Amino acid sequence: MKPIKTVFDTNVYLAASKQSSYARIQLQRARPNGPYQLYISPEIIIEIRSKLELKFGYTAEESGIFIEMVMIYATLIQPKQKISGVLKDAADHIILECALEANAKMIVSADKGLLRLKEFRGITIIHPTMLQYLT
C-alpha cells in the first residue's frame, strides 16, 4: 500500500519533542515503508522552533537538533498558495497551506479549530490518536 501524504500540525511535533511519547512513535512511523509520508514547510519549522524555545525553554541548539531529527522523517516543501479566513486562529493556516502544496490526504492535529473542520478541500483532518489505526 502506498503511504498516505500527511501533514502534522505544530502541536503534534511539540508532543513528539518528548523522547518516548506517543507522538514521537507516530513521527518515526513516517518512514519510506511506513503508513504515511510526512510533509513540512519552513513556516511550520519556524513555529515549532519558536514554541520549543519560548514555551518549553529549549535553547536554539536543542530546537535545531529536534528539527534535524524531524527532517529524517519529513519532506520539506514550500507552499505557494496563501490561505486566509478559514480558521479563527490565522496562524493555523500554515498547516492548510502545507497540506495543499503537498497534495496531502490527511492533516493530523489536536487543535480544536482544525478538528472542527473535519476536512479541507478533500483533505481529512484527524486527531493524532487515530494514527494507531493506520498500518
Image (cartoon, helix red, strand yellow):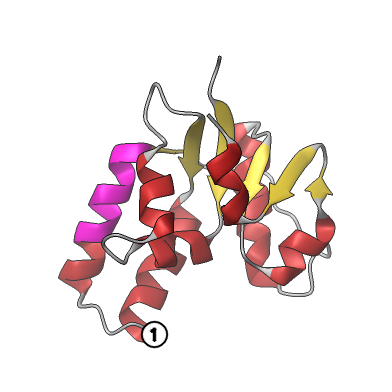
In the depicted structure, whether residue 17 falls above or below residue 32: below
Percent coordinates x, y for residue 99 in the rendering: 63, 42
In the depicted structure, whether residue 2 falls above or below residue 118: above
State whether the magenta stretch is mostly helix, strand or loop. Answer: helix
**As drawn, which residue projects farthest toward the front?**
133
At 53% from the left and 24% from the top, the residue drawn is: 3
Percent coordinates x, y for residue 119 in the rendering: 81, 47
The residue to which callout 1 is attached is 55
Q: Is residue 67 magenta?
A: yes
Percent coordinates x, y for residue 92 in the rendering: 65, 65
At 58% from the left and 54% from the top, the residue drawn is: 129
Q: Look at label 1 and name its amino acid.
A: Lys
In the depicted structure, whether residue 132 falls above or below residue 88: above
Q: In the image, 86: left or right of 68?
A: right
Percent coordinates x, y for residue 87 in the rendering: 79, 67
Assign the N terminus to one quadrant of the image. Answer: top right
Query: What range of the chain is rendered magenta?
Result: 65-73
Label 1 crowd (10 A; few <14 / some 14-19 / many >=20): few
Q: In the image, 27: left or right of 12?
A: left
Which element is circle 1 on?
Answer: loop
User: In this view of the protein, which residue sits in the foreground, 75 or 69?
Assistant: 69
State whether residue 50 appears in this view.
yes
At 46% from the left and 67% from the top, the residue drawn is: 47
Q: Is residue 12 magenta?
A: no
At 31% from the left and 79% from the top, the residue drawn is: 53
User: In this view of the protein, which residue sits in the foreground, 132 or 92?
Assistant: 132
User: In this view of the protein, which residue sits in the foreground, 112 or 133?
Assistant: 133
State whether residue 80 appears in this view.
no
**As drawn, which residue projects farthest toward the top?**
1
Q: How many marks?
A: 1
